[in-house]
Image (cartoon, rainbow, N blue to C red):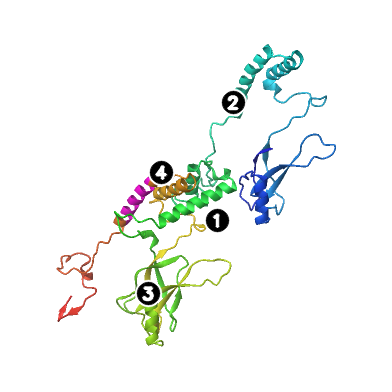
Amino acid sequence: AAAGVGGPSGEALDKYLIPIIPEVQMRAMYAANPITGPPKFVAVRPKLLEPNTEGQRFEVLFYPVPDQAYTLDYRYNRIWVKLSTTNKYPAGAAYHGELILQSCLRMVEQRIKGKRGPHHELFLEMLGASQQIDAKHKAVTRRSAWPVKEYDPNTDALLAGKADGPPGSSIESIRRDVGIYLGFPANPDEWSYDQEGMVDTISQSGIDQFHMPPIIPELKSEMHVWSFMLPIATLTTVADTEDYDAPSDFDGIQGDMTYQSSNEGYGSVPVVGEEQIRRLKQHNPIQTGKPQLACTFADIDTDPGYQQNVYKIRLYPKPDAEYVLEYKYRILADTFGGRGYTQSVALGVPVHRLTILASCFYIAETQIKLIVDGPMKRLFFERLKASISHDSTLHRPEYLGYNGDNSGAGTPWRDFNRATTVLVGGIQY
């Protein structure tokens, strides 16, 4: 029976381990989805006895069915053939010859003399010594090899690739640490296909949980929105066009839209409900002019091969010329696309790397280890509070609005004290 199986190797394929699964499970997988491709799983089953064949024979099954030739490496337990004129030496005789001799004499005592004698005791003593020798020969000092970094032989610089970004900030480093927490080898190249799938699932869920963190009542009454997930985008209008595509990673507008240039107008373009703009269009459906209101709405994705949320931005009234609007929007991060990565560095690292890892460990603790209220949950919420505090303090505004008593006179912000004014009862504010 196979004890371990290697992975398919080729220029276009990564090497990985192929786990051995029960044959009945593989038959169920074939029945549900009979596909072809690089082997991901293997099963071993006995073959029917053949005429003139000595001993049982086995065969291996792969899933999916291999679509081309692959070279596989594996280690197996060997059934040794009988000693003969061509096979003169028993396996292990070089190190365990005395043990083999005592084993033979022990059989003589039991089968010829019908009792246990001194050779039985000697055999047990020799067996313990031989087991120690064998364990020493196959023992390893480390459970797994740490991933080897690749350097340019000419410049000694670390080659770019999966380790893009500051040290420890790549998706690969997060996956590696999640794998270590789950008890997998430190080198992802030693993982099996299903271990990779488990690590990817935990990592994606942990990163998603960090990007959309749970509400912490003692800090705020609503979900915290990270500052690094609020980029500023521009929208250039086209005359007689009211609907515009939002960015592909769009998850909603934060605040109001504004005009980029004072030549196009002052003030802001508030974001209102889509129903409100529809009601305004009922009264004057052909009105055009400078946009005064905006809304967002979900659209149907017409691409049948990739399903995702698609959003549009609608302006009212319908623009009568070209205007450039700016707005801040929330990012919908997609770290893992299918089995690959849509980005090499997770949003929020390296500053919040420990919080992201704690989030991943918390997911693994509840979903894999089935621990409801464990230490990783407490660690995650402690780290989350620290990250929210850091993010809120770092981006806290210094200018808080209109300064009525002019206490900021002489400061660089003096010119902005009355950037927006109103006239009430003849008094300008």
Measuring 79% from the left and 25% from the top, which residue is drawn there? 83
Compute the Cα span from label 3 to label 1.
37 Å
User: Label 3: which residue?
Assistant: 273
The residue under label 4 is which amino acid type?
A: Gly
Q: Which one is earlier in the sequence, the residue at label 2 or at label 1?
A: 2
Q: Please indicate whether residue 160 sits to the left or right of residue 108 in the image.
A: left
User: Label 4: which residue?
Assistant: 374
Image vertical order of residue 342 relative to residue 317, above or below: above
Residue 240 is at least partly visible in this image: yes
Image vertical order of residue 417 relative to residue 81, above or below: below
**Element carrying mark 2:** helix
Q: Position of residue 228 (x, y in %)?
A: 38, 59
Measuring 27% from the left and 62% from the top, which residue is drawn there? 397
User: Label 1: which residue?
Assistant: 340
User: Label 2: which residue?
Assistant: 136
Compute the Cα span from label 2 to label 1.
41 Å
Residue 323 is at least partly visible in this image: no
Q: Which one is earlier in the sequence, the residue at label 3 or at label 1?
A: 3
Compute the Cα span from label 1 to label 4.
31 Å
